[in-house]
Image (spheres, grey):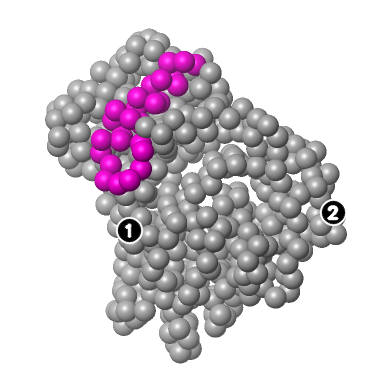
Amino acid sequence: MENKLLTAKATLPHYDRSKLVPRIVHLGFGAFHRAHQAVYADILAQEYGSDWGYCEVNLVGGEQQIADLKQQDNLYSVAEMSADGWQCRVVGVVKKALHAQVDGLEAVFDAMMQPEVAIVSLTVTEKGYCHAPATGTILMDHPFIVHDLANPHQPQSAPGVIVEALARRKAAGLPAFSVMSCDNMPENGHVTRNVITALAEAISPELGAWIKANVTFPSTMVDRIVPAVTPETLALVEQATGVADPAAVACEPFRQWVIEDNFVAGRPAWEKAGAELVKDVLPFEEMKLRMLNGSHSFLAYLGYLAGYQHISDCMQDENYRRTAHALMLNEQAPTLKVQGVDLGKYADSLIARYTNPALKHRAWQIAMDGSQKLPQRWLDSIRWHLANGSRFDLLALGVAGWMRYVGGVDEQGENIEISDPLLPAIQQAVSGSKEGEARVQALLGLKTIFGEDLPANEKFVKQVTEAYLAVRENGAKATVAKY
């Protein structure tokens, strides 16, 4: 298979792959990582002779992805899709691929124990951190964490695997590595540090102190729209490259990566491949989470309810297009601290990216795991508006859209397949309440999402309830048009 991919109509890895050193162990070999961080490393190897390679690890699920990758000598293709055509590249920076349940956890620890490992990075989605999104702290009663506290040498969670790898490095007298989250969370480095140090301290106070003194947790902001891979995507990539590749991924041409420059054992020269290395990532993260991810979620819930399958379908509806733009500029932009960015231009560029007809980004995919996403995408902004006495009509409409969505039935009377780590609690709130105001009250009772303050705020409750009743009475399409 290797030779086939090396004959693809694409930018091929013309560097000597045998010289790569797997200095980065990455947990979470999903579509986003393949299309984002690995591409930066591939550009560095191709154009600047970098020897930074990856060891890719999946802990739970994704067995097939790792198997497909091994089958192809760790090569896979990335296609950038735009209306004008497709640009493809074959990525060659993966040196090793492991699955914890296939190759065994010891093989994963063996990879993390290599002296040259300088960074362990993660794309495990928000729920992979076993934390409460409202506070950013570890959930000690999370089933994975309960298991890891009882069996620290056989962990199940990503934080547990990192803590055990660091414990083994400490015991062996090896230097620590930096831990870099590449997931969509505000201050993702701080969340990662909170979770890992709390777990380590609970296992061994001495280990917790060593990690605090020797490990850094740089924050990052990642941006590239990467729809979930479908059989249709794979067929289109094969058409473009002339080679079938089950590990292929397709994405938009745009990519951005802002990284806090705080590494204990060195890092690649990412800036040569277009990344921005900064002292403080938070203002950029907030900008992206609120303007891009916040409007994405808004379109996902209210678009799905209206029968729009993809974000680009929503963009064909003038009302959805204008409302998403207004949400970005009128309700999200005022809450931001970022300096030196033209937010009007940023909003326009987001709308243009959403309109890309080649990107089939499913509303259902973006709607997943809402309990983990609402706090940073909408609720923090709503708190800002409540403190400043300003309007947040569209943010309230977004929350109402989520509440209608998790009710489990769309406006065509079809069942919605809801994917969320808090699904049992959400379903209990839905089934235990009457449709209408009582439903809003029941869902606001989920403290891990809404905290203590918002459900107690009369203005917030009133606005969300009004929006909810409007969507219930008139449907999402008519309500968005009215707003």
Q: CA distance from mark 1 to mark 2?
A: 42 Å
Q: Is residue 52 visible?
A: yes
Q: Which residue is mark 2?
A: 7
Q: Is residue 99 visible?
A: no
Q: Which residue is mark 1?
A: 280
- The kind of residue tagged 2 is Thr
Discs 1, 2 touching: Cβ within 8 Å? no
Give the dominant element type of the magenta stretch: helix, strand or loop: helix
* Residue depicted at 64% across the width and 34% down the height: 82
Determine the image quadrant of residue 239: top right
Rate crowding at label 2 as few (under 14), some (14 to 19) or many (20 or more) other CA atoms within 10 Å: few
Rate crowding at label 1 as few (under 14), some (14 to 19) or many (20 or more) other CA atoms within 10 Å: some
Residue 300 numbered mark, or none? none
Identify the residue at the far bottom of this view: 173
The quadrant of the picture occupied by the N terminus is bottom right
The quadrant of the picture occupied by the C terminus is top left
* Residue depicted at 48% across the width and 53% down the height: 257
- The kind of residue tagged 1 is Asp
* Residue depicted at 38% across the width and 69% down the height: 262
Determine the image quadrant of residue 14: bottom right
- Horizontally, residue 267 falls left or right of residue 83, namely left
* Residue depicted at 53% across the width and 68% down the height: 268
Q: Magenta stretch?
A: 317-343
User: Percent x, y for residue 17?
Assistant: 72, 70
User: Percent x, y for residue 377?
Assistant: 35, 39
User: Percent x, y for residue 398?
Assistant: 35, 27
User: Percent x, y for residue 280?
Assistant: 32, 58
